[in-house]
Image (cartoon, rainbow, N blue to C red):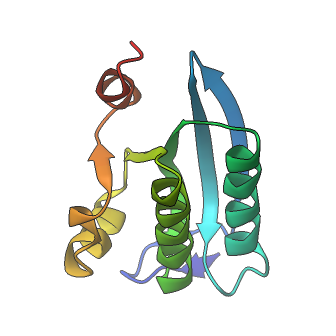
């Protein structure tokens, strides 16, 4: 067990990414830790997004509900993905951030950068893909 930032105990879980397609939108279900201390987790995420860009994917939803821990390295990976998508006129949305992640997005003012939705349905509707 590892003590979290706010004192809660949780299992140490490496980041995993499951990719699925909903109409024209790719959904990345991210779970585990998106932190610098887990070697390669941020690089794994960036590589996944790069592959989507290379394949011509136009719209991506990143489901972060399963992210158990995130630090500045993880936030940087999300920002990098957002910038890469935006540079090529593609769109990325975050869904279901935990209360801690919502707090981090707010204090870093990244909540003004990302399109954050509560549910997948809400994000899909925003893409016009219900």
Percent x, y of residue 14: 74, 65
Q: Residue at x 61, y 42 (%)?
A: 28
Q: Quadrant of the N terminus?
A: bottom right
Q: Residue at x 60, y 42 (%)?
A: 29
Answer with the quarter of the image where residue 80 lies: bottom right
Q: Total of numbered circles in the picture?
A: 0
Q: Left or right of 36: which side holds 120?
A: left
Percent x, y of residue 41: 72, 71
Percent x, y of residue 92: 45, 47
Q: Left or right of 94: which side holds 34?
A: right
Percent x, y of residue 83: 48, 65
Q: Nearer the viewer, residue 124 or 13?
A: 124
Q: Nearer the viewer, residue 95 or 85?
A: 85
Answer with the quarter of the image where residue 7 lies: bottom left
Q: Residue at x 36, y 80 (%)?
A: 6
Q: Residue at x 55, y 36 (%)?
A: 58
């Amino acid at each position: 067990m590892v003590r979290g930032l706010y004192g809660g105990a949780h299992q140490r879980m490496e980041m995993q990414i499951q990719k699925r397609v909903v109409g024209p939108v790719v959904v990345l279900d991210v779970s585990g830790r998106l932190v610098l201390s887990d070697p390669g987790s941020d690089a794994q995420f960036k590589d996944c997004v790069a592959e989507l860009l290379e394949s011509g994917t136009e719209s991506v939803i990143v489901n972060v509900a399963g992210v158990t821990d995130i630090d500045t390295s993880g936030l940087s990976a999300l920002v990098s993905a957002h910038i890469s998508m935006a540079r090529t006129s593609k769109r990325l949305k975050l869904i279901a951030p935990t209360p801690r992640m919502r707090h981090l997005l707010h204090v870093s003012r990244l909540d003004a950068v990302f399109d954050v939705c509560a549910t997948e349905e809400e994000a899909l509707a925003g893409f016009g893909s219900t």
